Amino acid sequence: MIFSTKVFIEMLCECEAILTDGTFKTRPIMFAQVYVIMGKYLGEVIPFVWCLTPKKTQP
């Protein structure tokens, strides 16, 4: 399951750097991982996309 907005995706495309992070401890119980895609936008690191994955090995 992926959450974002059209505006966030457009802003992410303009970022000077893209970063990702996944966590296994803090997540809804029915998912294995929360994966976040962030970007460095105007000097700030902002989360733009949130992914809830059912497995830790999701492609």
Image: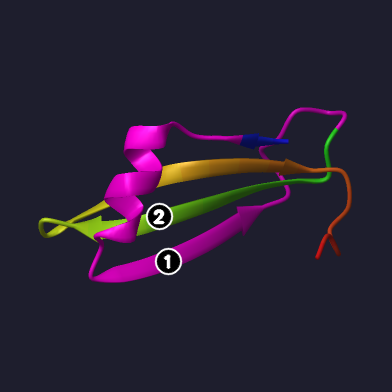
Label 1's element?
A: strand
Question: On the picture, is 7 further left or further right than 25?
Answer: left
Question: On the picture, is 49 further left or further right than 48?
Answer: right
Report the amino acid beneath label 2.
Met
Q: Residue furthest left?
A: 42
At horizontal 40% and vertical 34% (from top left) the residue drawn is 6
Q: Name the N-terminal-most of marks 2 and 1.
A: 1
In the rendered image, residue 45, in percent from the top left (x then y), is placed at: 26, 55
Report the amino acid beneath label 1.
Leu
At horizontal 66% and vertical 38% (from top left) the residue drawn is 26
Residue 38 tag number: 2
Residue 19 tag number: 1
Would you call the spot at circle 2 few (<14 residues within 10 Å), some (14-19), or many (20 or more)? many
Residue 52 among those drawn in magenta = no
Residue 43 tag number: none
Would you call the spot at circle 1 few (<14 residues within 10 Å), some (14-19), or many (20 or more)? few
**Quarter of the N terminus within the rendering:** top right
Residue 29 among those drawn in magenta = yes
Q: Give the range drawn in magenta.
A: 3-30
In the rendered image, residue 8, in percent from the top left (x then y), is placed at: 35, 39
